[in-house]
Structures are given as structure tokens and as C-alpha cells.
Amino acid sequence: MKDKLEDFIKDNRDQFDDQEPSQKVWAGIETHLPEKKRTSYQWLWKAAAVVFFLSSVYLFLRLETVDQPQLVADNSLAKEFKSVESFYFQEISEKKGLIYDFESESANVDADFEQDLQKLDAMYEVLKEELMQNPSKKVVDALILNLLVRVDILNSQLEKLDQVKESKKEDDEAKNA
């Protein structure tokens, strides 16, 4: 039976190919399709992490020896950085708390998100060591950029979790209606 059907389809394929369903059929199909999800910006974050990593390597290779007058200026630079660092650490910890509160409400946290944060943490530690050994404006700028990228990644993850929560809420309302 199956072979006869396959043979019939192969023999009459041209007759099948010229037929198209009506707009009404396509409209019915589209109503049953799930909404198109927003495209993920993971590739953007990964590219930013790679650029940041490469710029960090470049900074390490290009740093010059620090002479004594510049060392005094760099020490004040490190002190100013401490206040910026504490501000961003507070922001990061608040956002992490919000994300893990979402996770406890059964929303899934993206594994790539956690890996990106771990990589940024590792790069941050390397940059901190470099700042202690050879203080410079470039290293401070790289540290601040690292903190900013982390905040952006956390904001992106919070947006994703909000969307998941909203879609679950809409699904629950549709089921209850």
C-alpha cells in the first residue's frame, strides 16, 4: 500500500507542485503558530567579551614601566576607582539578586549568561592584579568597561526573564478565560 502511494506521488509530483493553499488556509495556520521570539543578542555579548579580552591582552603587552611622578597620580587614580567599583558592585549584586529571585519562581536562567559572567569575573581579577602592579588609566578604564559589560549582561538577562514571566502570565490568563 505504501509503495503504491509513493509511486503515485512520484509519478504525479508536477500536478501537486502547482497547487497552493488559499490565504484562508495560511491565516488559519498562522494563528496556531507560536509568536516569534525576539532574536537573542548572545552573539553580541560574546563578541563584546572577545573584544574586551583582546583589548585586555593588548593593554598588558603595551604597558610601559611607570616612573615615580606618574605613580603618585596613579595611586590617586586607584583611590578614585574604589568608589566607582563599590557603586558597580552594588548594582551587580542587586541585579544578581533579582535574577536569582526569578529563578526561584521557576524561570530558567540562561547557562551562557552564567558562563559570560564567570569569564568577566576572571578577567576582572587579572586586571585588578595588573592595577596593583602597574597602575594606569588604561587599566582602570578596562576595569570599568568590564563592570559595565557585566551590568549590561545582567540587564539583558532580566529582560529575558521578564518576557518569560509575562508570557507565562498571558498563558495562565488564556487558560483561565
Image: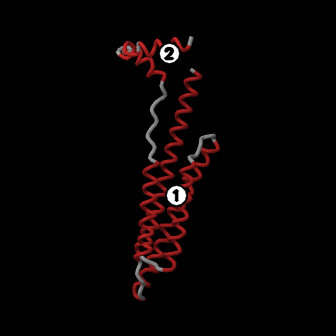
Count of marks overlaid on the render: 2
Where residue 72 sits, quadrant-wise, is bottom left
Q: Earlier in the sequence, mark 2 or mark 1?
A: 2
**Disc 2 from disc 1: Cα separation:** 63 Å
- The residue at the point 56 percent across, 32 percent down is 168
Residue 6: give its label: 2
Q: Say few, some or many: other residues with alpha carbon within 10 Å of mark 1 (under 14 / 14 to 19 / 20 or more).
A: some
Give the structural element (helix, strand or loop) at label 2: helix
Q: How is the image coloured?
A: secondary structure
Q: Are marks 2 and 1 in contact (CB under 8 Å)?
A: no
Q: Position of residue 35 (x, y in %)?
A: 46, 30
Packing grade of label 2 (10 A; few <14, some 14-19, many >=20) is few
The foreground one among 50 and 16 is 16
Q: Quadrant of residue 69?
A: bottom left
Name the residue located 42 percent from the left edge and 89 percent from the top edge: 68
**Callout 1: SS:** helix
Q: Nearer the viewer, mark 2 or mark 1?
A: 2
Q: What kind of residue is marked 2?
A: Glu
The N terminus: image quadrant: top right
